[in-house]
Amino acid sequence: MTVAGSPSSSATELSRTETLSLVSLSGASLAILANTFHGDGEPLIASLALSLVAFSLCYAMIRWLGPTFIKAGFRGRDLSKVNGGEIPECMGAVCAAVYLITVIIFIPFPFYKDIVAATSGGGNRDVVVEIQIQHANEGRFLHRFPHNKLASYLGAIISLQTIALLGIGDDLFDIRWRHKWWIPGLASIPLLVVYFVDFDVTSIVIPVQLQPYLGELFDLGFLYYVYMACVAMFCPQSINMFAGINGIEVSQCIVVSLLIAFNDCLYLFTPYPHPATDSHLFSLYLLLPWIGVSCALLYHNWYPAKVFVGDTYCYFSGMVFAVVGILGHFSKTLGLLLIPQLFNFLYSCPQIFGLIPCPRHRLPKFNARTGLMEPSVTPWSPDRQPHPLVGQVLLFLHRLRLLKATTDEKGLFVETSNLTLLNLWLVWRGPLKENRLAFEVTMLQLSVGLFGLFVRHKLALLIFKEDNWGSTGQH
Amino acid sequence: MTVAGSPSSSATELSRTETLSLVSLSGASLAILANTFHGDGEPLIASLALSLVAFSLCYAMIRWLGPTFIKAGFRGRDLSKVNGGEIPECMGAVCAAVYLITVIIFIPFPFYKDIVAATSGGGNRDVVVEIQIQHANEGRFLHRFPHNKLASYLGAIISLQTIALLGIGDDLFDIRWRHKWWIPGLASIPLLVVYFVDFDVTSIVIPVQLQPYLGELFDLGFLYYVYMACVAMFCPQSINMFAGINGIEVSQCIVVSLLIAFNDCLYLFTPYPHPATDSHLFSLYLLLPWIGVSCALLYHNWYPAKVFVGDTYCYFSGMVFAVVGILGHFSKTLGLLLIPQLFNFLYSCPQIFGLIPCPRHRLPKFNARTGLMEPSVTPWSPDRQPHPLVGQVLLFLHRLRLLKATTDEKGLFVETSNLTLLNLWLVWRGPLKENRLAFEVTMLQLSVGLFGLFVRHKLALLIFKEDNWGSTGQH
């Protein structure tokens, strides 16, 4: 399985070229990092430098820890290879750990300016307690420091750590669906509290056409929090469901991260301080390290995979998106970037809710003879046919090419393709090589996402009064 | 091994009595919890009620999850039993998970009053952005909310989650010492940032006798942060080292928690709002749920143990103490409560630093004939004797009864007892039954701790001008 120039799956040492590249990349990044202290502690440059260090560290650790993971029982066999040996599983946990270390080390950076400004205000708090009481309303150092931003950042880290613990627990124990679906909602409590005390914007803008009836703004109130908790529960699960072939989990997450980062950058280059700039900076601080560690993982997880990512990666990545979407106030834009995941989820519903039998794994089937991936199927026996109504729908979907159904001469169902976007893509495109399939679906994600951003910033003006980019309107 | 009236280690179902007790306890607690919303949302009562719910949940989950843990490879054999079967290991992870869920759910409670007060100030933030800029310095809703308290609480949760991840990683992979000793220091970064922006008190009070030379206060500056990071690194490790027999890890932690909680209560009942009251309330909010889940674990881990606690429990518990000590500003008082752990650490140093060989496990040895625990020993061979200087010290310690050394007729060392407090206690008291040993050492912890608090509040007045309890002085 060794490809020329790339290490075999058993190689756990870094090659000399790799070591040199990683060390020089880290060295340069650390130099940049040290340099940010001279100015105002430019946090965006620092975040970029730390992300490159995180990439190097994650790259090396994934290589080094392979045998340790295999020894601890985190291993799996690749079903879509001819002679697949056992490779390490759950490597997303390494990404999550490196990412968390990075964002924790980063905590002081966005506040460096405030800390430097505040240094003169330090000293013994108890001694100055009386002075403080006098000055409490005018705001001494305590009130100058952006505690609300710190709380946002800390709340984000808590949500991510909670989801990491859930992911690791799931990879270890295979927690049952009914025991785990609510945990991301729980993990979002710190976010919602922070959102409440910092923003509490629960109104949605009404499309121009409906404004005569509903007014300009409609206050969802408490329901807005339920909506945000649902975003937090949806993102991790939907990414976890859109998985199954080498590289697809990581590549879709990198594409979504890059698109969000691109959208964030649009707000950074507006000529004047924009009310949304801070939220989008916050989003970049959390996304850049995630892009860094994901790239390191993709290198090892792309076809032919040398490691698997595990549920931890999918959950964690989804939560990164949910966190930046909620605290960056663009959860609706996020929805536009996750359309393939949303489609995959809705498309899967008949199998999730038991209208059609759902096998444990629905990933595309590897045809060892051709070496290509084909849609996997749910078999039907003559004595176990779908409900007549469901059968009609299945035939209708088959006619729309949204499903591949095979029937025998009596009109009984023999098999239907499993309801996932990957299988559907294979129904449309015919059998494909695994890396080709992953590449095409990733490009689909990119195109849909770019179109989504276009709709968000250009077409939205047709139904809303203004876009919040380049204007001071709502968002 | 089944003791009459208590479930056997294979029983994973709760008995009817247990179910009834747990359900009624949880029901009563939830009723109390709901009731707190009528008043000012009394957070201390809510914390107490949530802790009881956490106890019930943890008790049930430890029982239910036993087979799952064994299946996932978290299992161990009790070396100090005659016919010890395999029992679940790493059950501290269940405690940590239940605890984290509890403290995350608790987030809104201490801020309930502020949230209610602030509700009228809600509404659409972007709409009022101009008003805000005008009012920024006077402080609208945003500044009324105690963001600094929220940031403290969130920082504490992050530190605890980081240590939970480390503990689980250690239980899974047996991480090497040089790869993990610094992680609790890393986990303390959020704490230190929060401490910096909220307090930044880095001065220590100088004893009266030295004040003519050093002044009343001595500013440690940056070193104070290094000191706090060391506290965070010391607490988890020292508790992890003071382990090895059924129940001792949990019982020492419960004793320390109760003593800290007792000390906190001293500050609550002072007649006027004391500057330290908030810090000690904060400490109670974090300690009560930990006492709850620890009691549930102790029931299952006390002799004869039906589950093991794992490194996760010890690390996590140590970090709970470090967090409340640092953010509650009583890290020196905490030191007085951890004297047995400190002694055990210092006493172990010769073995840790390799002056004396250190076996993988130094727990007391079980004598299957007598059924009693005896000090475990390091054997010496005639061709591998300690350095002459070390030998002299060993003999000196032996004479002081701080060690048991056996020498042959030529004066060569045959064996020396391992340097842990548990072995030392057995050297002093002779062979003991395992539960008797755990009980006596727990009582030692309690007595030393109570004496420590007495010293802190009474004798400290001999060298410091004033105690901060019942006065407005320093602490």
Image (spheres, coloured by chain):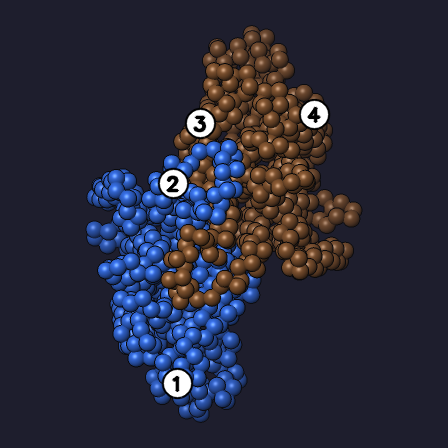
Chain colours: A brown, B blue
| Residue highlighted by disc 2 | B118
Callouts 1 and 2 on one subunit:
yes
Residue type highlighted by circle 3: Asp
Of mark 3 and mark 4, the one earlier in the sequence is 3
Q: Nearer the viewer, mark 3 or mark 1?
A: 3
| Residue highlighted by disc 1 | B397
| Residue highlighted by disc 3 | A219
How far apart marks 1 and 2 lie (CA) works out to 64 Å
* Placement of the C terminus of chain B among the 4 image quadrants: bottom left
Task: Where is residue B18? Give x, y as percent.
Answer: 24, 45
How far apart marks 3 and 1 lie (CA) works out to 75 Å
Q: Nearer the viewer, mark 4 or mark 1?
A: 1
* Secondary element at image label 1: helix
What residue sits 27% from the left and 66% below the top?
B470
Of residues A121 and B429, the one drawn nearer to the viewer in this rendering:
A121
Q: Are marks 3 and 1 in contact (CB under 8 Å)?
A: no
Q: Nearer the viewer, mark 2 or mark 4?
A: 2
* Secondary element at image label 4: loop
Vertical arrangement, residue A225 with respect to residue B304, above or below: above
Q: What number is the disc on residue A431?
A: 4
Vertical arrangement, residue B248 with respect to residue A452, above or below: below
What residue sits 65% from the left and 47% below the top?
A292
How far apart marks 2 and 4 lie (CA) works out to 59 Å
Q: What number is the disc on residue B329?
A: none
Of residues B349 and B123, the one drawn nearer to the viewer in this rendering:
B123
